Image (spheres, grey):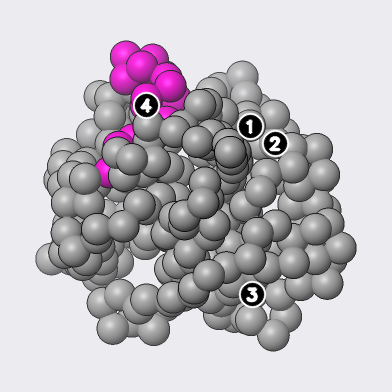
Amino acid sequence: MTDSLTIATWNINSVRLRLPIVEKFLLEYAPDVLCLQETKCPDGNFPLAALRKLGFEHIAINGQKGYNGVATLSRRPFLAEERRGFCDKGDSRHVATDIPFAGDKLSLHNFYVPAGGDEPNPEVNDKFAHKLAFLDEMGDWFASFSSPSVVVGDLNIAPYEQDVWSHKALLKVVSHTPGECDKLEAVREAGNFQDIMRRFVPVEEKLYTWWSYRARDWSAADKGRRLDHIWATPDLAATATGMEVLREARGWEKPSDHAPVLMHLKA
């Protein structure tokens, strides 16, 4: 018996403000699971009823008022849920769910990594120091993973040269500094995860998921970065049949500055 599963990830930049485009995405692209980041919504105000009407009966939330926040919406029941805190900050930046797949289960980790502020110097920028510490804690935890797992989310780092519009121009810009890029690779390798997006788009080709609101015409300027990621352990990576970045969603009405990313699994 075969099974197929589509998992999407999207930094929505306020789930209540952008509920219409979340609904549009779910209706038109029909993923089995959608992981949202930067929901900016306390758990009690999350739009559960509207999303359950679309068939997403199972919703795991880790939210807070006005900032951060992650949520995983699923057509399939959760076998387990976990919310982990990082760096003793009390931020809502992670939720994990075990989801049935191919007669077994996979552990799906939904992350929103700190952006890190503007100055890439942890000695003068506490936000950047927090980002680096968060990544270290992620890596230490991932080293203990043993079950089939997927990590998705806004990891706020574009690690490769072709993950940004200009490697040279962004070398000293937070999200593409060499230290951050090396640290994110170390985190991924600690969990023995494969980069699913780069499995389907060669590392020599440009690949973006985020375009700044500051650009007058974001699409024409195309000064993007790949800040959103999908990783999978080798057993699950072997079942991946496709990946897509829904660039057109960046142009929808009242859009997020991120585009959704989808991964298709079949086993």
Element type where label 3 sits in the image? loop
Left or right of residue 239, residue 266 in this image: right
How far across and down, in percent of the image, does residue 133 sit?
Answer: 20, 66
User: 126 or 72: nearer the eye?
Assistant: 72
Residue on which disc 3 sits? 41
Q: Tell me the residue at 56%/22% (across/down).
A: 221
User: 49 or 246: nearer the eye?
Assistant: 49
Examine the rendering and report whether any part of residue 157 can be seen: yes
Q: Are marks 1 and 2 in contact (CB under 8 Å)?
A: yes
* Distance of label 4 from label 1 (alpha carbons): 15 Å
User: Which marked residue is nearer to the observer: mark 4 or mark 1?
Assistant: 4
Residue on which disc 4 sits? 198
Compared with residue 165, is residue 212 higher up or lower down, i.e. above or below? below
Q: Quadrant of residue 2?
A: top right
Q: In the rendered structure, which disc, 2 or 3, sits on the residue that comes first in sequence? A: 3
Amino acid found under the numbered disc labelled 3: Cys
The residue carrying pointer 2 sits among few (fewer than 14), some (14 to 19) or many (20 or more) residues within 10 Å by Cα, namely some
How far across and down, in percent of the image, does residue 98 sit?
Answer: 48, 64
Amino acid found under the numbered disc labelled 2: Ala
Left or right of residue 50, residue 34 in this image: left
Residue on which disc 1 sits? 246
* Distance of label 1 from label 3 (alpha carbons): 24 Å
